[in-house]
Structure formats: C-alpha cells, structure tokens
Image (cartoon, helix red, strand yellow):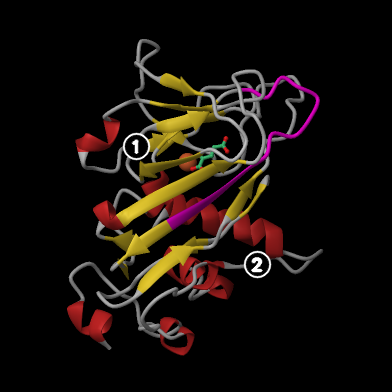
Amino acid sequence: MRTASCTAIAPERETDRPACPKTNSKPTDPGQGTSRHPLHQDHLYFPFRPIDRVVAAWTAMEEITRENGCLVAVPGSHKTEEIMSHGYPDWDAVNAAYVGIQGVTSDVKYVHIPMGKGDTIFFHSLLWHGSGRNSTPRYRKAISCHFCGGCRFIDVKKTIQEPLEKEIRELAKIKFSRGGAKMRDEDLDGFEMWTIWQLKSRVVRGHEILPIEKSATKRPAEGDEKLAEA
Ligand SMILES: O=C(O)CCC(=O)C(=O)O
Ligand SMILES: [Fe+2]
C-alpha cells in the first residue's frame, strides 16, 4: 500500500468534514507497471453523499512529470454524473483495491498534468483520472486531501460501490488473520465502508453527527434523514 489515507466529511449542513490528507508517494516501478494507477473515479471509494459536494485537492511536493508518473485526467468526464463500474485492469500485475473504470477504450482522450513543486489542483470526485508509471529510481511525492461540505454517510450495499466494500472486507480478513486464527465474516461486523471513513475523516466545522458508538449498531441509508439529523 503506498498511501496513508485521510479524508474529511461534513455529515450535515453545519458540519464540514475533510478526509484526512494522504501522502501519495508513488514508488519506483519494479518493471511490471504496478506504479501505474488506472483511470478511476475517487467517489467509488467514498460512502457519502451528495457527490457534487466533494472536492479533491492534490498537491505536488516536488516537480512531477510524465517521467515520474504525473496525473492524467479525462477533461469533462465528471459530467457523466454517475459512478462508473470499476474492476481490476487487464495488466500483468495489479495493486489490491486499485481498480479502474471498465470498458475504457484505448482512444479515450486523456491529458497529462505535469506539475511544479507546490502546485495544487482541485478536482471533482467523479473525474476520470489516474497516473502513469514512475520510471525514475526515486519516489514521486504528492499529498492529497478530499473535502466534503455538507455530506452524510450512506451504506453502500446494493449500490455500484458494494463490490469494492466486499473487496475491502476480504483484504481486511487477510490482513487481520493471525496464524491459525482466520477471520470470519462475523468478525467483521460493523466493518463497513462508511464506518471506516468515519474513522479516517475529521470534522473541521460544525459537530459530529454520527458518533462512533452509534455506528456499530445503526447503519445509515440513502434518504435516512432522521439519522443525519440525530
Ligand atoms: O497518486 C497518484 O498517482 C494517483 C492519486 C489519485 O488518484 C488520487 O489522489 O485520487
Ligand atoms: Fe484518485
């Protein structure tokens, strides 16, 4: 895993919650192309709504060029206004949970985004973007943070995000299993995309409306206004 992640969410109007900043240190490529990040939409990973209240801030901590794997993006792609279906790319080697938009053809019109040290770009969480191979012998350093003003958590079950939640649970089972003590599904009760993000994000304005004690017993659903106001 190459990022230590953090995001902020605002679960109600007076609460603005940014995801904690994450360092996007892209390692040098071992030769299999695994330093590439397939075209994806960040919102696939986000169990909160509304989508159009979420913005990414991505800052280069050094000069970032095509050589060390700058960002690429498809201009205007966020206007599809929906989360696309994602899956693992058809590459020789992939990174766990680094999925890409399915059905993207090779003639997709993306642009490279070289950046100078300290440059920051802001982008919509539905924008199709990714990054290229780092063919230098050094890490490529950037930092990013997502911010959501006035969002609330949702349970992603029965949405296009459900397969990713399942994948994350499978990865957690492997990660947390110790020796002969294998984790079972029931050991992961309460380990859901929204509870993970509740822990990973911080309220920066307003107040917390879904305290952690509650999250273990109550699941929010889209349209669950009562919970959002609780
Ligand atoms: O760091 C990269 O190369 C890609 C990062 C990315 O997709 C993101 O921060 O949303
Ligand atoms: Fe991304």
| Magenta-colored span | 133-146
| Rendered location of residue 87, percent (x, y) | 44, 35
In the rendered image, which residue does mark 1 sit on?
Answer: 127
Kindly tell me whether residue 105 is visible in this rendering. yes
Instruction: Answer above or below: position of 112 versus 188.
Output: above
Q: Earlier in the sequence, mark 2 or mark 1?
A: 1
The amino acid type, in three-letter code, at marker 2 is Met
> Is residue 14 covered in magenta?
no
The amino acid type, in three-letter code, at marker 1 is Leu
| Rendered location of residue 126, percent (x, y) | 32, 42
Q: Secondary structure at mark 1?
A: loop
| Rendered location of residue 118, percent (x, y) | 59, 41
Question: Who's the residue at 69% across and 34% down the image?
Answer: 140
Mark pair 2, 1: CA separation: 36 Å
Q: Nearer the viewer, mark 2 or mark 1?
A: 1
In the rendered image, which residue does mark 2 sit on?
Answer: 183
| Rendered location of residue 27, percent (x, y) | 73, 34
Q: Quadrant of residue 69?
A: top right
Q: Quadrant of residue 181?
A: bottom right
Question: Who's the residue at 30% across and 38% down the image?
Answer: 84
On screen, residue 149 versus residue 100, left or right, reads left
Outermost residue toward the top in this view: 107
Question: Who's the residue at 32% across and 64% down the image?
Answer: 149
On screen, residue 77 versus residue 60, left or right, reads left
Question: Who's the residue at 43% across and 32% down the image?
Answer: 129
Instruction: Answer above or below: position of 132 versus 58.
Output: above
Kindly tell me whether residue 47 is visible in this rendering. no
> Principal SS element in the magenta part?
loop
The image quadrant where one finds the C terminus is bottom left
Q: Which mark is residue 152?
A: none
Instruction: Answer above or below: position of 78 versus 200.
Output: above
